[in-house]
Image (cartoon, rainbow, N blue to C red):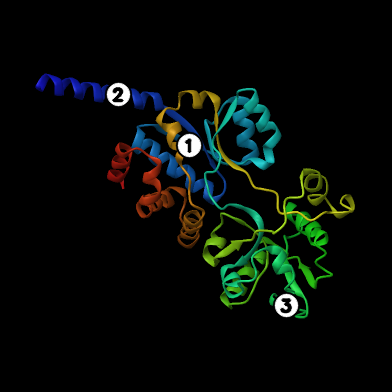
Amino acid sequence: MNKYMKGLAVASALTLSQGAMACGDIVMAEMNWASAELMANVDKIILEEGYGCSVELVPGATMTTFASMNEKGQPDIAGELWTNAVANPLAAAVAEGRLAPINDGPITDLGEGWFVPDYVLANNPDLKTAMDILERPDLFPHPEDPSKGAFYGCPAGWGCQLSNANLFRAFDMEAKGWLLVDPGSAAGLDGSIAKAVERGENWFGYYWSPTALVGKYGLQLLDFGVPWGGSENWDNCIVKPEQDCADPQPSSWTQSVVNTVVTSEFKANAGAAGDYLGARVFPGVVMNGMLVFMADNQAGGEDAAWEFLDKHQDVWTAWVSADAAAKIKKAL
């Protein structure tokens, strides 16, 4: 019996050693926005503490990280790659065997579009879609002309300024009693939301998630109530200046696609690390809450990652093996 137990212990140690060796050294992009910064640091801690990997975080951004992975095979992982911006070259890289999506949705409930504070929907149960709201400009009075509804678009110079302006025309919102508000800057857009919510007033406009502001003020992304109008309408009109978009057609906002993308070489040898990355999905409400924590406490990605692992064990333990979970909890 003792000989059997010793043999089992040796076999277990060998398995663990092989697992750590298989994981080895990993280079991961730490993208330059808060949710991706948090995600990269959570991944680093889980892979190192739970699976014995050695993870190096390197600065990243959508276009530069994609180009580096595609052309040089480094870094190994981009945890939160917003792939709309690189859709065609990514498809080519996947087809040619250089890159591979390993998780098609690392965060739930994300995307761009039209938002309202949650109490707007709670107080007006008949408003279920953006199309319903367009019929009620009276509920969103413009600060300078209360007889009109205020729709807050994007500041000048942002790509979404064009999309919102063209959708404003596509839905004939001016005729329905709306005025398009240019908030002037990112701070102006955020300030309009904060001011409205803190006063309990209604607000309607463009925003995106995950963000601290969505979590802090309980913004809800609206179903447009109409289907997407297709790539011909969106790519060749909605996203272009008005002079290049003479006849915009109604459309929901184009779907935001976010993947965890890895090099094909990493995927082929990822083992348990790949299983973890494929299973790792942050609930949108949890991610937004963590972004509020980061903003309120001026916390960086590493501090926020430890906070997440401590406070949301019910979430991340579902992503890892029981053995890895025990090791990670011991490190908290």
Q: Residue at x 42, y 39 (%)?
A: 44
Extreme residue in the left direction:
2
As helix, strand or loop, the secondary structure at mark 1 comes to helix
Q: Earlier in the sequence, mark 3 or mark 2?
A: 2
Residue 117 occupies quadrant: bottom right
Q: Earlier in the sequence, mark 1 or mark 2?
A: 2
Q: Is residue 301 left or right of residue 125?
A: left
**Mark number for residue 278?**
1
- Camera-nearest residue between 70 and 322: 322
Marks 2 and 1: in contact by CB < 8 Å? no
Extreme residue in the front direction:
126
Marks 3 and 1: in contact by CB < 8 Å? no
Name the residue beneath numbered marker 3. 138
Q: Is residue 291 left or right of residue 171?
A: left
**Mark number for residue 15?**
2
As helix, strand or loop, the secondary structure at mark 3 comes to helix
In this picture, is 51 found above or below 307? Answer: above
Q: Quadrant of the N terminus?
A: top left
Q: Amino acid at mark 1?
A: Gly
Q: Amino acid at mark 2?
A: Thr
Q: Amino acid at mark 3?
A: Asp
Q: Residue at x 30, y 27 (%)?
A: 16
**Mark number for residue 161?**
none
As helix, strand or loop, the secondary structure at mark 2 comes to helix
Q: Is residue 242 left or right of residue 128?
A: right
Q: Earlier in the sequence, mark 1 or mark 3?
A: 3
Extreme residue in the bottom direction:
146
Q: Badge 3, how many Cα within 10 Å: few under 14, some, many 20+? A: some
Q: Position of residue 155 (x, y in %)?
A: 73, 60
Find the distance from the CA under tag 3 to the CA under tag 2: 67 Å
Q: Position of residue 198 (x, y in %)?
A: 56, 75
In this picture, is 150 found above or below 147? Answer: above
